[in-house]
Amino acid sequence: MTTDSNRAELIREILSGVTALAKVLSTEQRRPFEGKVLSRSQLLALFLLARVPAGLTPGRLAELLDVTPGAVTQLIDGLRAEGHVETQVSRTDARSRIVVLSGSAHQEVERFETAVVARLQTRFAGLTDGELASLAHMMNRITTEDR
């Protein structure tokens, strides 16, 4: 049985690893949407929308970004003005709107992620496919647990 202090130390090790990986990602030479000035929240919204092809309601996007509904409205308006997102009427509720990536934004996010994944392949080379799948599953669990 692992004690609370042992668990805390393991969590510290995980945080250290995540921080190191975040540093690698932040030093990425190429940025998505080069030439465009996008806030951190706007970029995060674009990456979240890339993971949900059917789109998200503004309310759900606000929850995931941990911002107010007013802030997400401004964020969406800015992204729409740049041609990165579109809003559509929900197929299940005509009163609701869904935010989706534009075709060009989807392609840009895909190109960026593909390049980053290719660059990071060697860092994950020591993991088996099963370990990689487990890591992905565990990271998803701890980052989406309260969402």
Image: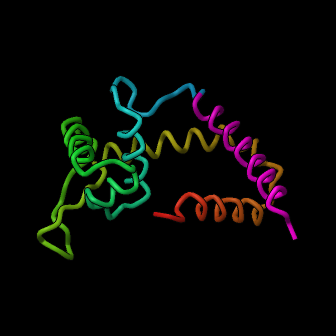
Residue at 76% x, 66% y is 130
| Residue span colored magenta | 1-26
Q: Position of residue 4 (x, y in %)?
A: 79, 61
Q: Is residue 34 above or below residue 135?
A: above
Nearer-the-camera pick, 43 or 122: 43
Residue 10 position, x and y percent, is 80, 53
Does the magenta run of residues contain 128?
no
The image shows a total of numbered marks equal to: 0
- Look at the picture and state if 119 lies above or below 99: above
Seen as rendered, the residue at the extreme bottom is 92
The verdict on residue 25 being magenta is: yes
Furthest residue toward right: 1
Residue 29 placement: quadrant = top right
Task: Identify which residue is drawn at 61% across, 44% down.
Answer: 117
By secondary structure, the bulk of the magenta-drawn segment is best described as helix
Residue occupying the point 64% across, 32% down = 23
Most extreme residue toward the front is: 4
Q: Position of 43 compared to 103: left or right?
A: right
Q: How is the image coloured?
A: rainbow
Does 96 sit above or below residue 106? below
- Horizontal arrangement in the rendering, residue 117 relative to residue 135 (left or right): left
What is the x, y in percent for residue 79? 26, 40
Where does the N terminus fall, quadrant-wise?
bottom right
In this rendering, would 67 be left or right of 126?
left
Residue drawn at (21%, 41%), measured in percent from left and top? 74
Percent x, y of residue 62: 32, 53
User: Which image quadrant is residue 108 in?
Assistant: top left
